[in-house]
Amino acid sequence: MKGLILAGGTATRLFPLTIVTNKHLLPIYDRPMIYYPIATLAGMGIREVMVIVGGKSVGDVVQLLADGEHFGLNLTYRYQHGAMGIAHAVGLARDFVGDDSFCCVLGDNVLLGPSMADMAREFEEGPYGAGTLLYEVSDPERFGVAEFDADGNVVAFEEKPAKPKSNLIPIGVYFLRPDAFDVVNTLVPSGRGELEITDLLNHYLPGNLYAPKFEGLWTDAGTVTSLIRAAELAEQESRSGRLLAPPLRPTS
């Protein structure tokens, strides 16, 4: 399995913190934000990772991560022009992925807890076409929201609904296979002008989506409030000795 980290975007919700820098370089407790998705993929046993960059401070992202050797990874990079959506960014990795399955992690997602290696293995060895992790939140209207049938099976995802049909959202971890690129080519931009990841996931519903509930700690860090929350969770895990993150050594 290969890995994909999405680290582009304009991050307007974090202005003025991101006026002159990429949000994925902002600190979460004692390390840059982008270290956390790196840790998520490394914890799955993934070693080949592409980082999709864009917006400001692209050179700083590359300088920070370099070739990934100090993380035990082999990193490559691809540039995304503009905010064209998560599914569009996924489509940029087609040549990198080749015939392999892959896991895409959003660069502003902080997942804390045990390794997800077993989940990655269950997806890769299972019959699923795609997968994501579900998480219960108090403000689902900020996210894509899962809709369930009477038997508790996911039947659809709705992007940022005014009236959410559940409190479970697909967090920014997506398991995919190479056929996902053909699906991306069929998507049309949403009202936001982006290719939505929820539209890509909906292609595999019902019945062909791996969607276990994530039992660790999760937050995005896309707003000032969630950025603070992420730092608090990371400090909590660090003090308990459970913080799963790459080493803090410099790249040189």
Image (spheres, rainbow, N blue to C red):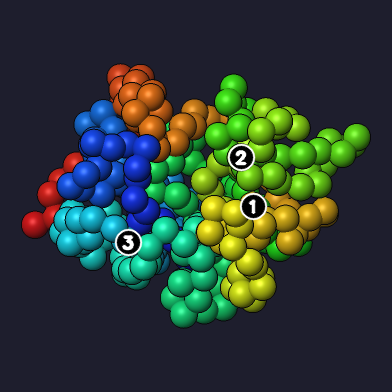
Q: Position of residue 63 (x, y in %)?
A: 16, 59
Residue 53: mark: 3
- Measure the alpha-carbon separation of dots 3 and 1: 21 Å
> Which residue is pictured at 34% across the width and 50% down the height?
10
**Rendering quarter of residue 223:** top left
Left or right: 218, with 176 as reference point: left
Q: Position of residue 247 (x, y in %)?
A: 23, 43
Left or right: 197, with 61 as reference point: right
- Measure the alpha-carbon separation of dots 3 and 2: 24 Å
User: Nearer the N terminus, badge 1 or badge 2?
Assistant: 2
Residue 198: mark: 1
User: Nearer the N terminus, badge 3 or badge 2?
Assistant: 3
Three-letter code for the amino acid on which mark 3 is drawn: Val
Three-letter code for the amino acid on which mark 2 is drawn: Lys
Residue behind mark 2: 160
> Which residue is pictured at 76% across the width and 47% down the height?
156
The vertical placement of 61 against 235, above or below, is below
- Frontmost of labels 1 and 2 is 2
Task: Determine the secondary structure under disc 2.
Answer: loop
- Measure the alpha-carbon separation of dots 1 and 2: 10 Å
Task: Determine the secondary structure under disc 1.
Answer: helix
**Rendering quarter of residue 99:** bottom right
The vertical placement of 100 against 195, above or below, is below
Characterize the local packing of mark 3: few (<14), some (14-19) or many (20 or more) Cα atoms within 10 angstroms: many
Foreground of the two, 76 or 7:
7
Three-letter code for the amino acid on which mark 1 is drawn: Thr
The vertical placement of 221 against 99, above or below, is above
